[in-house]
Amino acid sequence: MSVLVDESTRLCVAGITGREGSFHTLNNRRYGTNVVGGVTPGKGGQDVEGIPVFDSWADAMAEAQPNTAMIFVPPRFAADAILEAATAGVALVIAITEGIPAHDELRVYNTLKRDHPGTRLIGPNCPGILSPGKTNVGIIPASFFEQGNVGVVSRSGTLTYQIGNEIARAGFGCSSIVGIGGDPVPGSSFVDVLELFEADDDTELVVLSGEIGGSAEEEAAEYIAENMSKPVVAYIAGFTAPAGKQMGHAGAIVSGSSGTAAAKAQALEAKGVRVGRTPTEAAAIAVEVLGGASVGA
Amino acid sequence: MDLLEYQGKQLFARHGLKVSSGKAVTTVEDALVAADEVGYPVVVKAQVLIGGRGKAGGVKLAANESEAREHAANILGMDIKGHTVRTVWIEHASDIASEYYASVLLDRSAKQPLVIFSVEGGVDIEEVAERTPEKLIRHHVDSLAGLSHAEGAQIAREGGADADIVDGVADALVALYEVWLEEDATLAEINPLIVTPEREVKALDSKVSLDGNALYRHPENQGLSDKENEDPLERRAKEEGLQFVKLDGDIGILGNGAGLVMSTLDVVAGAGGSPANFLDAGGGSNAETIKQAVDLILANEAVRAVLVNIFAGITRCDEVALGLIAAFGEIKPSVPFVVRLDGTNDVEGRRLLSEAALPNVHSAKTMNEAAEMVVALAAGRPVGAAA
C-alpha cells in the first residue's frame, strides 16, 4: 500500500496543453501513472501525445472517469479549476500552481468543506505526491527515491528531495512522499496526511518536514502524541529566519513571536518527536529508528 | 506587502471607515500648507513601516504654525530603527473619549477570517491578550457568508462597547472586514479605533498588509508600500523575479526551493557562519537566472564567500553550472565560492564546472561539508582545515 496515489489512480490534468503542464504530465505517464485525460477550455477534442483533452471537468468525468486531478493552470484560474474538478466529483485534487491569492485559497478550502466533503485537496504550491514504484503525480523527481516503508510529508519540495535522497542512500525507501505545499491555506495539513500514514500498512515511520510560519507543526505535535502509534521524525527549516520577512514561500513568515522554528521544534520534542537539526541528521535519525546503520550526521 | 499608515487610511476611507482628514507631505513647507488646510491643532506623524514611532518622537501634536514647523522639521529625515522618515502625515487632531482596538486577519489555523475587538485599545494588543484576555473578543467569520451588521453589533456588545455606539462600532467592523476582503488584505488593523466626545467612531491609525499574489486584481494598489525605504537589493531582486531577502552576515547563499534555502541558512549558521542573504532561484531556474542571482549576491559588499547549494529536481545541474560559468566570465568575482550540486544531471554539472576550472571555486559533496567549507573561507581560513 501507499497513500493517496497508487496503481488505481486515474489522472486528469488541468492545464495539460501548457508548457509545464504537458512536460510533467508526460513525465508522470512515463513513470507509469495512468493518465486518462486533460482539461483545457476550448481545446476539447485535441490530444497531447495520445492523451485526450476535454473542454470541461464534466466532459472529462463523463468520458474518462478520472479519480485524481492535477492542477497546472496559472494562479488566477486555479481556484475555479479546483472547484470545477470537485464539482465533477473528482475525489483527490493535487494543485501544483504557485502564487494563488490567499483569499482564493480560503474560498476554495471552505467551499470544498461545505459543498464537496468527498474531495480532498493537496497543495496548492506543492510538488505533488509520489508513491515510488507505483505512481507519480506532480513534479517530484522519482529517481531520488526508493520504494520502502518511510512516509514523508513536507511543506517544501527541494527539502523533501534532500531528505528522501539521504534515506535512499542509506538503503531505505519510501511508501509515499506527500508535498502539502508552502502556502498560508493548504488544502490538507500535516495532521490530515499523518492520519493516512498511520492507517497505511506499508508505512512504518513518518518523516515530517516543516518550516517557519503558521502553527501546522504544533498541531501535528498534538496529533502525534494522541493518535500515532508509528514513530515520527521531524525536521524544521528556518531557525535563522528574521521575524517579519517572508522567506520565499507565501506561508513562511514569522509574525510576532509565533511561528518560529524554535517553537515548532520544541512543541514536537515536548511530545516525544525527535527533531533533526539538519536534513542529514533527520534522515540519520529515521534510518537509526528503522534499525539501519546510522549515517554520519 | 505592508502599507504605510496613510495608505491604509486611504483604503479605509474608500470603504466607508471614518478617518480624520489629512495629507501626506514630504517637506516642511507642504506640511504647513496641509496643516492650514486640515485646521489646527494637527498631529504630525512619521510614515515608516516600523512600530514604536511615538516613543521615538515620530508623532507630535502641534497647536499652531510654529509648533508644526518645528515638529515637521524634526521628524522629516529622522531615523526610526533604521527607517528614514521621508513622508509625514498631517491630520486634524481628534478629541478622544475612548480608545478601542479592532482587526481582521486570516487565521491560518482555523482557516477562517478572525475579527478581534477590544475596548482596551491604544496599547500593545499582545499585552492586553496576556494581562486581560477576557477583554479581547475573538470572533471567527464564515468566509463564505461574510460579516453581517448584526454579527458586528454582537461583537461590540460582547466586548463591552458603550451601548450608544454599538451601532457605530458594528459599522466600523463591517467596513474593516470589507477592506480585508475586497482589497485582498491578510491583515487590516485599527489601533486605536477611537470614540470622540461627539460619539463618532473613527480610525486613528492603520496597519494593513496586502497579499502580493493578489495585486494583479488591484492595479490601484501596486504603487503602495514604503518604496523609498526598501532595500535597494531587495527592490532589484523583485524586479528580476528572484526571491531575495537581505540579511546581516557575510556569506552569500544561492539555492533552489524556499525550504532548502532556509535550511541552508540554518546549516551555515550551525557551522558558525553568518548568512548575508536568502536567495531562492526557484524551481526550473536556467543559466540566465543563476547569472542574475550571482550578480545580485555580489552586489552586497559585505559578502566574503558564497555558497551555491542546489538539489535539482526540475532544475538541472548542468544549467546551473553553465550559469555559474557565464557569471564568472562577466563578473569575475573576487570572493571564493563553494558549490554543491546534487540531483538532476549532477554528474554533467560537476564535469562542466571542473573543466571550466573557475578560479577560487570549491566543490563540496554534501550540504554539511559545503557549509563548513564556506564558513572557513569567509573567515579567511584555508578549506580542508574545517572540512
Image (cartoon, rainbow, N blue to C red):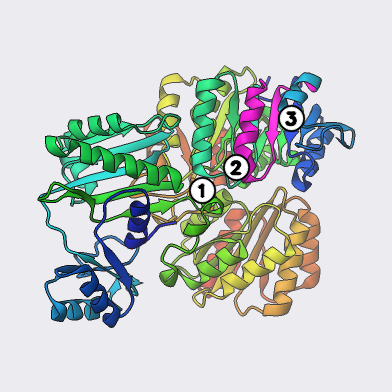
CB-based contact (under 8 Å), mark 3 and mark 2: no
Q: Residue furthest front?
A: B37
Q: Chain of mark 2?
A: A
Circle 1: residue type: Ala
Disc 2 marks a residue whose amino acid type is Asn
The residues bearing labels 2 and 1 have C-alpha atoms spaced at a distance of: 9 Å
Q: Label 1 near label 2: C-beta < 8 Å?
A: yes
Q: What residue is at 55 percent from the left and 19 percent from the top? A: A117
Say if labels 3 and 2 share a chain: yes
Dot 1 falls on which chain? A
Q: Which mark is residue A56?
A: 3
Q: Position of residue A9 (x, y in %)?
A: 74, 23
Residue B32: % across, % down: 23, 78
Residue A143 lies in the magenta-colored region: no
Q: Residue at x 69, y 42 (%)?
A: A73
Which residue lies under the disc numbered 1? A250
Where is residue A21, by image quadrant?
A: top right
Marker disc for residue A125: 2
Image spot of residue B234 (x, y percent): 51, 67
Give the extent of the magenta segment. A64-90
Of residues B202 and A279, the one drawn nearer to the viewer in this rendering: B202
Circle 1 — which element?
Answer: loop
Residue A134, given in percent of the width and then of the height, sits at 76, 26
Lower sequence index among marks 3 and 2: 3
Residue B284, labelled with which disc? none
- Name the residue located 32 percent from the left edge and 57 percent from the top edge: B9
